[in-house]
Amino acid sequence: MFGTDIQAEVKIAVDEIRKQWRATPEIAVVLGTGLGAFVDGLNIEAVIPYSRLPGFCTSTAIGHAGELVCGRVGETPVLVLRGRTHCYEGVSLDRVTFPVRVLEQLGVSTLLVSCAAGGLSPAFQAGNFMVIEDHVDFLLHLNSATSGRSRSFTSTPYDEELNELICNIGREQNIPLNAGTYVSVTGPNYETRAEMRFYRRIADAIGMSTAPEVALASQLGMRVCGLATITNLCNPDALAIADGEDVAKVASQTEPNFRRLVLELIRQIS
Ligand code: HPA
């Protein structure tokens, strides 16, 4: 059961945000590693550090600022989570997914989730994007009584209509987009050769986030679109060094295209 303590915490965070920003946002964006500059494409009306929001955890990961940015795309109010917390940071899944509960209570019905990911598919190149069609969740949900799947999905948690829209935008704007399956792993270590071979059999891209937030958002009735930035290749036959700094650097290089895709998607759905 979803605890009353968390419900009370959600309410406190919602009240705090409403005090600082009066709009009712229907769309929110979760920014993955290195994509923080996206907020420069908004008309920013308020910036609230996670440290000022009860229940939010300040991220210790590279490329995650840890602030809620409230603004507009044209007239449309949009909330942006500039940075997220990961399970490998030692926090429970309830904390990782807490912001999603807050977004839902603020009125958000469409969630655009982004992340950096390693490319498992041999067809991918670093700097490409992958629209997430579905995911495999290999994060251990043992430390949570509330955030896992409490009922089965009736379809993929990712919205097919939003996926089609973003793929069309990619085509129109000449931004190459692949589509595929994302696997969430605990990390923070990167994969061994044997693990790459294993994950290649079940997914096209791999990362350390996304699935828990998406699963919860979908269970709460939100439409979800997931976009992974391929920051490095996981090729078991040509091992290459990957670390957090490189991942954040490549992701930040893709940000201008990410911004074009997501701003246009927001314009089309608002
Ligand atoms: N593995 C896991 N997570 C990641 C990777 C990777 O290669 N790249 C970015 N996030």
Image: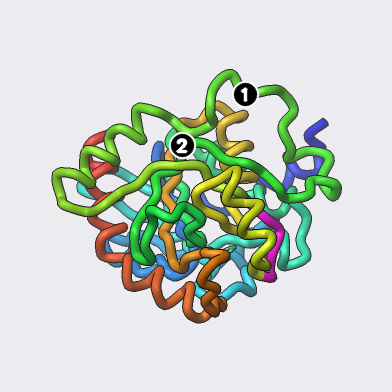
Dot 2 corresponds to which residue? 133
- Residue 88 at what x, y percent from top left? 72, 64
Which residue is at a point 65% across and 66% down the rendered structure image? 193
Dot 1 corresponds to which residue? 153
Magenta span dominant secondary structure: loop
Q: How packed is label 2: few (under 14 Cα within 10 Å), some, or many (20 or more)? A: some
208 in relation to 34, above or below: above
- Residue 103's label in the rendered image is none
- Nearest to the observer: residue 7 or residue 16: 7
Which residue is at a point 52% across and 64% down the rendered structure image? 235
Can you tell which of label 2 and label 1 is closer to the viewer?
Answer: 2
Quadrant in which the N terminus appears? top right
85 in relation to 64, above or below: above
Asked if residue 126 lies left or right of residue 83, the reply is left
Quadrant in which the C terminus appears? top left
Ligand 1 sits in quadrant: bottom right
Residue 89 colored magenta?
A: no
Which residue is at a point 16% across and 52% down the rendered structure image? 174
- Quadrant of the rendered image containing residue 196: bottom right
